[in-house]
Amino acid sequence: MTTLHRMVSSITPRQLEVLSFLAGREQWSVGEVASGLGVSSAAATKAISRLERKGLVSRTIDVMDRRCVNVRLTHTGSDAARQKAGSV
């Protein structure tokens, strides 16, 4: 079993929803993710933190507004989202 396959099998349906949402464009703010998924910023932050620990997303501080955190899929996250979506 490959590392990616193992990682994909551990992705929850909610995490897959977040990954699929993030795949819509290159970068999102946490607030945009929360709004787009219809959840609180705290819930979005928690889901993003779990995905970040798995190496599927990365977070960066916005250079123009340090209060804003931007989220993007990593290459592994993109691959995992595609593989998981293809298996459903």
Image: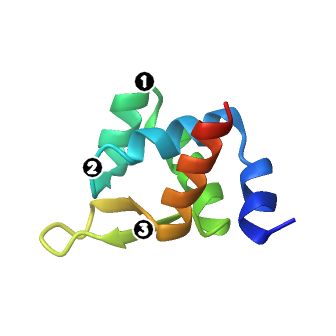
Query: Relative to residue 52, is residue 32 drawn left or right?
Result: left
Counting residues from the start of the chain, the first of labels 2 and 3 encountered is 2
Q: Give the residue pinned by disc 1.
A: 38
Where residue 38 appears, x then y in whole percent? 42, 24
- Mark 3 or 1, nearer chain start: 1
Q: Earlier in the sequence, mark 1 or mark 2?
A: 2
Q: Is residue 50 above or below residue 2?
A: above
In this picture, is 23 found above or below 1?
above
Give the mark count.
3
SS class of the residue under badge 1? loop
State whether residue 39 is above or below residue 48.
above
Taking the spot 87% from the left edge, 65% from the top edge, the residue there is 1
Residue matched to label 3:
59
Q: Position of residue 68 (x, y in %)?
A: 27, 60
Q: Residue at x 68, y 37 (%)?
A: 87
Which secondary structure lies at badge 3? Answer: strand
> Which circle marks residue 25 in the picture?
2
Q: Residue furthest right?
A: 1
The kind of residue tagged 2 is Arg
Residue 13 percent location from the top left of the image: 67, 33
- From the viewer's perspective, is the residue at label 1 or at label 2 nearer? 2
